[in-house]
């Protein structure tokens, strides 16, 4: 991941309260104006969920862009509608790779 140009992933609803990231892009302006939900990649398999007009009672799971497993929310900032997610599966693989 380029620190100056983060990747953005638009999210699509695949049913049963699960959202799946689509293709990555670095066009932040397009993603911010066209997508209701999108992820912004931060270091070490961590992603920030951004929502344009998220309903307060709307709950859903978000899948990892790499392994497609459901990620765990690690922090929620309700005032700015941002949730940070981590992929435990990818994190575990990265940690094991470094130890070997």
Image (cartoon, helix red, strand yellow):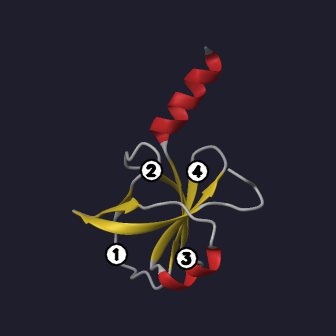
Disc 4 crowd rating (10 Å Cα; few below 14, some 14-19, many 20+) is many
Which of the marked residues, 1 or 3, is nearer the chain's N terminus?
A: 3
Q: Is residue 32 above or below residue 61?
A: below
Tell me which residue sits at (50%, 69%) in the image: 38
- Numbered label attached to residue 58: 1
Q: Quadrant of the C terminus?
A: top right
- Ranked by sequence position, the earlier of labels 3 and 2 is 3
Query: Quick one: label 3, few (<14), some, or many (20+) residues within 10 Å?
Result: some
Where residue 1 sits: x, y (%)? 67, 50
Question: Along the polypeptide, which appears first: circle 2 or circle 1?
Answer: 1
Mark closer to the chain start, 4 or 3: 3
Q: Residue placed farthest to the top in the image? A: 100
Number of the label disc, if any, that sits on residue 64: 2
Separation of disc 1 and disc 4 at Cα? 22 Å
Disc number for residue 46 = 4
Please name which of the two marks, 1 or 3, marks the residue nearer to the observer. 3
- Which residue is located at x 43 percent, y 61 percent? 22
């Amino acid at each position: 991941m380029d620190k100056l140009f983060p990747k953005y992933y638009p999210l699509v609803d695949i049913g049963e309260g699960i959202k799946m990231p689509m293709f990555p892009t670095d066009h932040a302006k397009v993603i911010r104006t066209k997508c209701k939900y999108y992820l912004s990649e931060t270091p070490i398999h961590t992603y920030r969920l951004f929502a344009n007009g998220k309903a307060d009672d709307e709950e859903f799971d978000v899948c990892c862009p790499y392994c497609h497993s459901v990620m765990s929310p690690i922090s929620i900032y309700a005032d700015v509608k941002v949730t940070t997610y981590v992929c435990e599966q990818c994190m575990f693989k990265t940690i094991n790779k470094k130890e070997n």
